[in-house]
Amino acid sequence: DIQMTQSPSSLSASVGDRVTITCQASRDITKYLNWYQQKPGKAPKLLIYDASNLEAGVPSRFSGSGSGTDFTLTISSLQPEDIGTYYCQQYDFLPQTFGQGTKLEIK
Amino acid sequence: EVQLVESGGVVVQPGGSLRLSCAASGFTFDDYAMHWVRQPPGKGLEWVSLISWDGGTSYYADSVKGRFTISRDNSKKSLYLQMNSLRPEDTALYYCVKGTNGYSGSYYDYWGQGTLVTVSS
């Protein structure tokens, strides 16, 4: 199975900060990497698909980059509503696997 | 509006069986593969199973292979998960999830609200 390793596991930042979360795959997954946001008590929500494509309706402060084994989710200016847990997911190989999550809090 | 509504989650004893259902609306159900993804309480996400648009192909996580069976009824726009030989480690919130192609892995653009399965004596 492809192992997905996210860092950091948790993060505390101030409103307006630039926030970066990384995801590393245990082997090349080309561009088949997605990012989800999960707020407490809610289902995950798709933010970015295929490494860098912004899902419709997602604010433009979210962006994704990377290819191969190394990927990044960036929030350009953190907003209070961005708190939650962020997961990366690969779908180049079955089983599709998720990272362990990054919990984002406001400082 | 796309809606995915899961049902069937209950408390069940180890070794027991359970069938989860998911009612879909707001999209052409038989155009897309469908998935089950689970989340143990306070933990991360785990993909469980997928079924192709026509029900002809299915895949499972090793952790459930041989115990769980995914199926679908396109005439009823419904997805199912038959869960047998349940273990305490199967305790989780089970999400019904829509794929973005008809036959294989993909990203997930719509999720249900989840149904909670608790395996405990």
Image (cartoon, coloured by chain):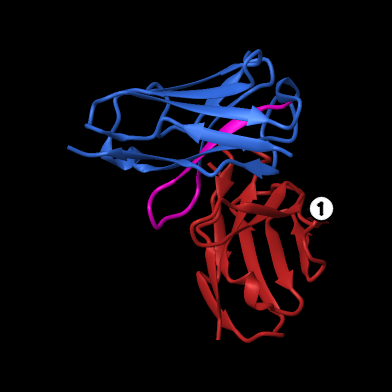
Chain colours: A red, B blue
Where on the picture, by quarter, is residue A5?
bottom right
The residue positioned 74% from the left and 35% from the top of the image is B100
Whether residue B108 is visible here, answered yes or no, is no
* Horizontal side of residue A43 vs B20, given as left or right: right
Residue type marked 1 = Ala
The residue positioned 69% from the left and 49% from the top of the image is A28
User: Taking A67 as reference, is A11 above or below it?
Assistant: below
Q: Quadrant of the C terminus of chain A?
A: bottom right
Element marked by disc 1 = loop
* Horizontal side of residue A26 vs A78, given as left or right: left
Residue carrying label 1: A56
User: Taking B91 as reference, is B85 above or below it?
Assistant: above
User: Taking B57 as reference, is B39 above or below it?
Assistant: below
On the image, the x and y values in percent for residue B91 come to: 34, 42
Q: Please report, as a chain letter, where disc 1 is located.
A: A
On the image, the x and y values in percent for residue A70 come to: 69, 61
On the image, the x and y values in percent for residue B3 come to: 65, 37
On the image, the x and y values in percent for residue B78 come to: 59, 22
User: Taking B46 as reference, is A52 above or below it?
Assistant: below
* Horizontal side of residue B2 vs A1, given as left or right: right
Along the viewing direction, whichever of B1 and A92 lies nearer the viewer: B1
Q: Is residue B114 magenta?
A: no
For the record, the magenta segment spans B32-46
How many residues crowd mark 1 within 10 Å: few (<14), some (14–19), many (20+)? few
Whether residue A9 is visible here, answered yes or no, is yes
Q: Is residue B35 magenta?
A: yes
Residue, far left: B121
The residue positioned 63% from the left and 29% from the top of the image is B24
